[in-house]
Image: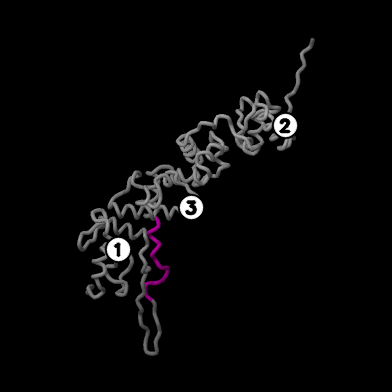
Amino acid sequence: MTQKFVLERIHRNTSEKELLEDLIRVSQKVGRNQISTKEYNQLGVFTSSTYKNRFGSFILALEKAGLSPLNNRNVTKEELIDDLERVIAETGHKQISREEYIKRGKYSFEPFRRVFKTWSNAVKEVGLNPRNYNISDEDCFKNIEDIWVQLGRQPRYSEMIKPFSKYSGRLYVNRFGTWTKALEAFVENINSGVQTENVFDEEENIECETKEKFITVQRHKTKREIGWRLRFLVLRRDNFKCVSCGKSPATNVNTELHVDHIIPWNKFGETVIENLQTLCVECNIGKSNLDWKE
């Protein structure tokens, strides 16, 4: 008898409804709402690859049918966190949706729901809670600056914990790749932003006409406000200590440091690093414009 060759059925025109109904049929046959790819390939009309091509992954297809993979029953919290962090690192994204994880992750949403109740709770475990989605890089850098000033030195990853740090170390790793890369980005941001943030685009002097004569009016070249980048550079230059009394947050947590103009602003002192100094709040309050003499 001559052997017949039969082409494999192409399922491109099969509706999603048919595909999902077959998943449910197989789950009913095995008597549970959890099925493995092996079970489906043995009992199903189609193949697990068909679902992957149509839905993005077999797990996503199961979820859409109200089912879950068999191998999710005994997954621990630590395993879920480890795999979630792995996917975040692979994508390099600053945030990750449930759907994106399921496409790339080992597990479905069912064990996350069992362990964390909601996807938001799971995301919080790795330092990317929903509020963190709206945190800018600038917010992250400002937080590093605050911690650096309090410690009087470069902060370590282990020190980026709440409530001491506004954001966790995990947020920085997920955002920048590693803690070292986060610090490098912080330093680059400091060095690139401070050069222009305080400078006006105008002439140093202008001429004003009066009835009698022309007079030259002096104008500031920089803004009065001290940006946080410039503030940090001054603090670091002064070793995060008051230049007057030597107080430092690193040795006295109640110490509050200010960055102040040496030549006062109203005496036409500019907001540049050479004209700024670090003072504790007590020394700064005791200082007055009258202390500066021409």
* Residue 131 numbered mark, or none: 3
| Secondary-structure class at tag 3 | helix
The overriding secondary structure of the stretch rendered in magenta is: loop
Q: Which label sits in the foreground, 2 or 3?
A: 3
Q: Is residue 184 above or below residue 271?
A: above
Q: Is residue 178 visible?
A: yes
Q: Which amino acid, mark 2?
A: His
| Secondary-structure class at tag 2 | loop
CA distance for labels 1 and 2: 70 Å
Using the image as rendered, state which of residue 75 and residue 15 is in the foreground.
75
Q: Which amino acid, mark 3?
A: Arg
* Residue 11 numbered mark, or none: 2
Q: Earlier in the sequence, mark 1 or mark 2?
A: 2
Q: Residue sitting at 28 percent across and 61 percent down?
A: 257
CA distance for labels 2 and 3: 42 Å
Q: Earlier in the sequence, mark 2 or mark 3?
A: 2
| Secondary-structure class at tag 1 | strand
Q: Position of residue 2 (x, y in %)?
A: 79, 12
Q: Is residue 194 magenta?
A: yes
Q: Which amino acid, mark 1?
A: His
- State the residue lying farthest toward the front: 31
Magenta residues, start to end: 192-205
Do labels 2 and 3 touch, CB within 8 Å?
no
Q: Is residue 150 left or right of residue 84?
A: left
Using the image as rendered, state which of residue 24 and residue 262 is in the foreground.
24
Q: Earlier in the sequence, mark 3 or mark 1?
A: 3
